[in-house]
Image: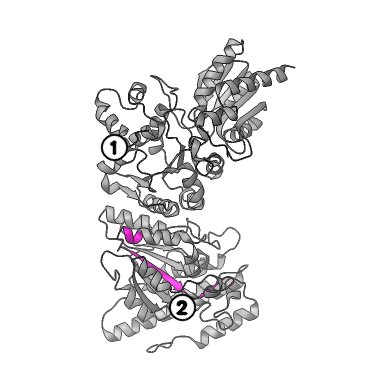
Amino acid sequence: MTLAATPATATTAATELRVGSHEWIAKYGLSAVETCRLAQLELARRDERFFSLEADLGDFGGFAFRDEFRDRYLDFGIAEASLVGAAAGLALRGKIPLINTFASFALMRACEQVRLDLCYHNANAKIFGTFAGLQAGFSGPTHHSIEDIAIARAFPNMTVIAPADAVAAYWATLAAGFHPGPVYIRLAVDVTEQVYGEDCPFTIGKGNVLRDGDDLTLVASGLTMVAEAKKAADLLAKDGISARVIDLHTIKPIDRELLGRAARETGLLITLEEHTVFGGLGGAVAEAIAEEHPAWVKILGIPDAYCEQVGPYAAHLHRYGLDAEGVAATARQALSTKEA
Amino acid sequence: MVLNESSPRAAESRFDDLREIAHRLRHHVVHMAADSAGAHVGGSMSAIEILTVLFFDGILNVDPLRPKMEGRDYLIFSKGHASAALYGALAERGFFPVEELKTYKQMGSRLAGHSLKSIPGVELATGSLGHGLAVGNGLALAGKHDNSSYRVFVVLGDGECQEGSVWEAAMAAAHYKLDNLVAIVDRNGVQEDGPTEEIMALEPFADKWRAFNWAVTEVDGHDVEALSGVLHKVPFTPGRPSLVLAHTVKGKGVSFAEHKNAWHYGKLSGEQREQALADLAAAAPARGGRS
């Protein structure tokens, strides 16, 4: 990872390719956190209300903002409660704080500040949580963030977004910037597989159908997961199974209409997330489906345990059956059970 | 009503007026604690003079008719459990009718045990301790950024300062040289379970703040004249946040509640209400002299 250097290069090169375009992101090999940071820079250029708030992790793509807007870049050191509280104070004065830190720290270390200072006051602040899910790989459970969706979506007023790739992360960040109220965006540092090409529709609260299908629906959210869902659908197609694929980038508010239709038309939904199987995407989908159109929902995620095995990200995904092969296997099995 | 005149005679009269207002605020607390399921009597009574001087001595630039007035000073009442004291001060200052105090913690009222964000004059809903100073930092940082002249006052409980988040925020305030920020600690020495020094010692308390690079002034937190003198002098040192360590008495003015952690929170019985009112009457300020 050459995090410090890449965004600057990309910014300089922005004249050649459209900023935020898939070619631009692919050319410079940008990760979601980097495109998010570049989108933050765009927001700050367009509107002086935007501030970047840091907890000593600005080197994850944040220094370009610091260099361009020194007076709107505030580092609070390793002190997340102080950071989130100050964000609420800035928001009370009409500023729009962009809070950047690791997912596990923003939402868990400063959980109550997020709950009361931001969410209860409906503060217009955005939280960008990096290293969400298992992307911290070798770093171990202290840096894996597998409970953040459940926590974030429990807060009234909070919008919860998990973009599918670096392209979506760019547009999600811009959308969040002008979406009133607290927003939590889940991100990761590694360069992940690109899902979106020329067309990346991003409307908060509206899921994207990436592939149509009748036999079952794969509902995925977040980096890597949506890409794996697409690949799983390819594998299933070889077996004559027609899988619909939904990128449910906004987990809250959830797209009930889209999910209800998928439940009616395919009768089986399989959710994929880098999160515990409790209270995350699967939980949110199951809640919506139970009310909209009851159907079988199978929840793929991290079981009720911390990931203590040391290993790379890909190995973790494989272990939990969250890669394309694992998802396809679950789908085949579920479908045969359903049809039996 | 804001009192702020300069001649010695006028000054004496002004402090008499402040003492009378403080006396009224204590009455309000007594009635709120008697007419509701209970109130945080101890920490409300200890904070009365602090609030009186802030609101009625020209310290806080606020307008009760325009609670969101641009350029106003901010009061973050971080020890939100002492809402009975805050509500009394807001009502007496004209943010809402004094009559409304009777609805304290009653069905359908907006006067919750811990302040809601919708109450006029309340900038931040507080009640969970350790939040106010960090939010005050954000307000003060915005003020510095915008070259605005408003100031931010944060009232903290002493027990509250056992929260680590207070010290995170204290560090940040000094780091960012927020001399537009004033924290006032209501040092009543007693928390819910007992004396602070027995539960979790804060001393050397003033030194802790000094070590965090704050400009510290200690004061008798029940002496309106002394408090007024101190609060009119902020910032004590340019480039540093100001800390007023106000030495107070938990439950001040109510004989059976003074210094008692048992009266951190409680409901006054009819008899206790009478006793408390008698205590207040006996200590009622006489004009032209200190009570």
Near-viewer residue (A37 or A102): A102
User: How many labels were placed on the picture?
Assistant: 2
Which residue is at a point 58% across and 63% down the rendered structure image?
Answer: B105
Q: Quadrant of residue B139?
A: bottom left
Near-viewer residue (A34 or A174): A34
Badge 1 crowding class, 10 Å Cα cut-off, few under 14, some 14 to 19, many 20 or more, is few
Write down the residue under mark 2.
Answer: B248
Quarter placement of the N terminus of chain B: bottom left
Near-viewer residue (B40 or B109): B40
Separation (CA) of disc 1 from disc 2: 50 Å
**Whole-percent x and y of residue A304?**
64, 39
Q: Is residue A157 above or below residue A205?
A: below
Q: Is residue B60 visible?
A: yes
Q: Which residues are magenta?
A: B173-193
Q: Residue furthest right?
A: A340
Which residue is at a point 55% across and 73% down the rendered structure image?
Answer: B41
**Whole-percent x and y of residue B217?**
35, 75
Q: Which three-letter amino acid code belongs to the residue tagged 1?
A: Arg
**Whole-percent x and y of residue A237?**
58, 12
The numbered mark at residue B180 is: none
Badge 2 crowding class, 10 Å Cα cut-off, few under 14, some 14 to 19, many 20 or more, is many
Asked if residue A120 lies in the magenta stretch, the reply is: no
Q: Which three-letter amino acid code belongs to the residue tagged 2?
A: Thr
Q: Is residue B260 above or below residue B63?
A: below
Q: Is residue A208 left or right of residue A271?
A: left
Chain letter of disc 1 in the image: A
Q: Is residue A256 above or below residue B255?
A: above
Q: Is residue B193 left or right of residue A3?
A: right
Q: Are the residues tagged 1 and 2 within 8 Å (C-beta)?
A: no
Q: Quadrant of residue A127?
A: top left
Write down the residue under mark 1.
Answer: A46
Q: Is residue B120 visible?
A: no
